Image (spheres, rainbow, N blue to C red):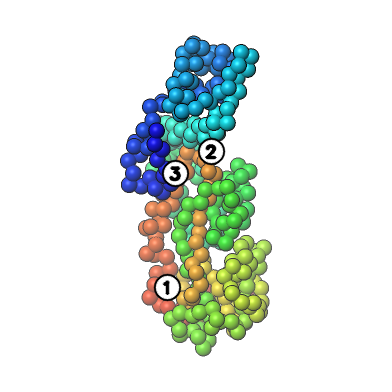
Amino acid sequence: MTARVCQTDGLRGVFVADILQYPMELRHIRYFLGVAETLNFSQAAQRLHVTQPALSRQIRELEDELGGRLFQRTTTKVSLTEMGHYFRQQTQKLAMQLDIAVTGAQQLAKGASGILRVGCDWRLGGIPIATAAKQFTESSPRITVQFIEKPTQDHAAAIREHMIDLGFVPSFLLGTARGLEPHHLFAGKMKVILPSGHRLAGRPRLTLPELKRERWLTLDTKSVPGYGPMMAHILRFRPSFSLTTTSLRGLIANVIAGHGIGLVPETALGSASEGVAVVDTDVTPIDVFAIFPKDGASPLLPAFLDALDQALAAGRANFLPEAADDRGKTRTIKVDRD
């Protein structure tokens, strides 16, 4: 028996039916799990509604196919072998995924229904969650997409605690999502915001060493979660900080007033206006990921992620359209001054 090893992404271009090349059938897995759970052939046969001789025959067929013993049998006891323990662990995952697939397919056949809880931190720009939710619920009216507002750095914990089904993290917070499944959404460019009269404002692109001697504005991490870790992740020198503000609008106002410069993701900037120059940098773009459970994920997730990817693809050309052809130009950003 030759096993084919394939990664998840490797299934593209592979005829999946070729992978399922073994004579064993789902009933063999079902019978095996029944015996593995009870460690009693008689009890398992009753639960599975088959005769004990038929159950024993199916287990022998499975063992012959695998080439080893799954159970150690004596006249008084049944126990799993080392191979049996391993096979149980792996087939339980398979059974769980199959159950999710069947449930999801049945929901779609009926007209899918249910609630999908999506973690949201609206300060993490560039993710068209609302657009995707609108498209998703229009195609499946019986589904409700519920927005649960939480700081980005809390999304992973909220998934583990079953408070949300889907969350989002930038790459510098991906470490908080260990054990969860990441789905890459996009890479956001980092822009430096300068006063329009700054000596470097007319440059098409700036490197971090060129900005080393500047005074830097920063955002309060309580008001804008993740900004501190992002700056620590990005800057390769110890910056000279000027002021700390509680909002992006406050940071931009301080840039206009000449109190310093700021570094922000392109997707967080919003519409352009006068008073500041927004310039490209050599900073590595910040990757943004959707995260969800590896096992036991909501059956609604695949369709919602498809809608999210479609919304991103449709809007990619429209992300900050002014930024595509005005590198280094002065841009106006409306700021409310109280």
Task: Give the CA separation, mark 2 to mark 3.
Answer: 13 Å
Q: Position of residue 171 (x, y in %)?
A: 54, 60
116 to 36, vertically: above or below: below
> Disc 1 marks which residue?
323
- Residue nearer the viewer, 280 or 8: 8
Mark 1, secondary structure of its residue: helix
Badge 1 amino acid: Ala
Q: Is residue 63 left or right of residue 212?
A: left
Question: 10 Å neighbourhood of mark 2: few (<14), some, or many (≥20)?
Answer: few
Residue under label 3, please give it: 302
Check disc 3 and give the amino acid type.
Answer: Pro
Residue at image coords 39%, 60%: 315
Which quarter of the image is occupied by the C terminus?
A: bottom right
Q: Position of residue 314 (x, y in %)?
A: 37, 58
Label 2 to label 1: alpha-carbon separation? 41 Å
The alpha-carbon separation of the residues under discs 1 and 3 comes to: 32 Å
What residue is drawn where x is 55% and y is 21%?
Answer: 35
Nearer the observer, 260 or 41 = 41
Q: Of the residues under marks 2 and 1, which one precedes in the sequence? A: 2
Label 1 with label 3: CB-CB less than 8 Å: no
Cβ atoms under marks 2 and 3 closer than 8 Å: no
Residue 211 locus on image (x, y percent): 56, 82
Say what amino acid the circle numbered 2 marks: Gly
Residue under label 2, please give it: 296
Provide residue 245's location: percent of width, then percent of height.
64, 72
